[in-house]
Amino acid sequence: MDFESLTGIANRIGTAVVGDTVTLHPSKRTIKGVFEEPTESEPIAGYVVDLSKPRLTVTEEDYRSIFSSELLEVRGGVYSIAKPIPDGSGMVVLILSSDQPSNASSKWL
């Protein structure tokens, strides 16, 4: 077994043990993921504004189980998936958006 395979196994175990519970809506199913909400400073109209860049790291298996119209509720916030980024080790980093997607079949929670 190579190093990447071992890293992927460790990531999946870590996510299952210490990850946040994520509720998918409208199905109410739950998955585990590691939620982060770093901020980045961006210049806008001559001012520097701190922007939140929420993301969630999940297993590829859990990512494949999420329907494109589902919203993700984690740590009191509700998000849609703006962009999935596979990391090559069996995990997917989901760049999240707090804007409701136009294809969402449910109302904001």
Image (cartoon, helix red, strand yellow):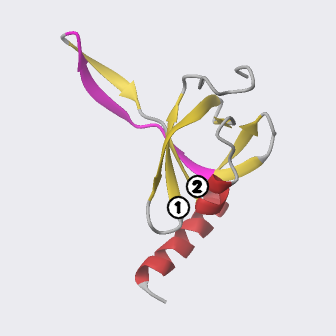
Helix or strand or loop: what does disc 1 sit on? strand
Residue denoted by label 2: 58
> Which residue reaches farthest left?
46
The residue drawn where x is 51% and y is 72% is 8
> Which residue reaches farthest top?
45
The residue drawn where x is 42% and y is 34% is 53
Horizontal and vertical percent for residue 83?
A: 47, 41
Three-letter amino acid code at the position of disc 2:
Val
The answer to whether residue 69 is left or right of residue 81 is right
Q: For the residues marked 2 and 1, what is the alpha-carbon distance in whole angstroms?
A: 6 Å
| 5 in relation to 17, above or below | below
Image quarter of residue 4 = bottom left
| 22 in relation to 69, above or below | below
Query: Which residues fall within the magenta stretch?
Result: 33-45
The residue drawn where x is 75% and y is 24% is 106
Quadrant where the C terminus sits is top right
Residue denoted by label 1: 91
- Label 1 near label 2: C-beta < 8 Å? yes
Image quarter of residue 81 = top right
| 57 in relation to 55, above or below | below
Horizontal and vertical percent for residue 16?
A: 66, 62
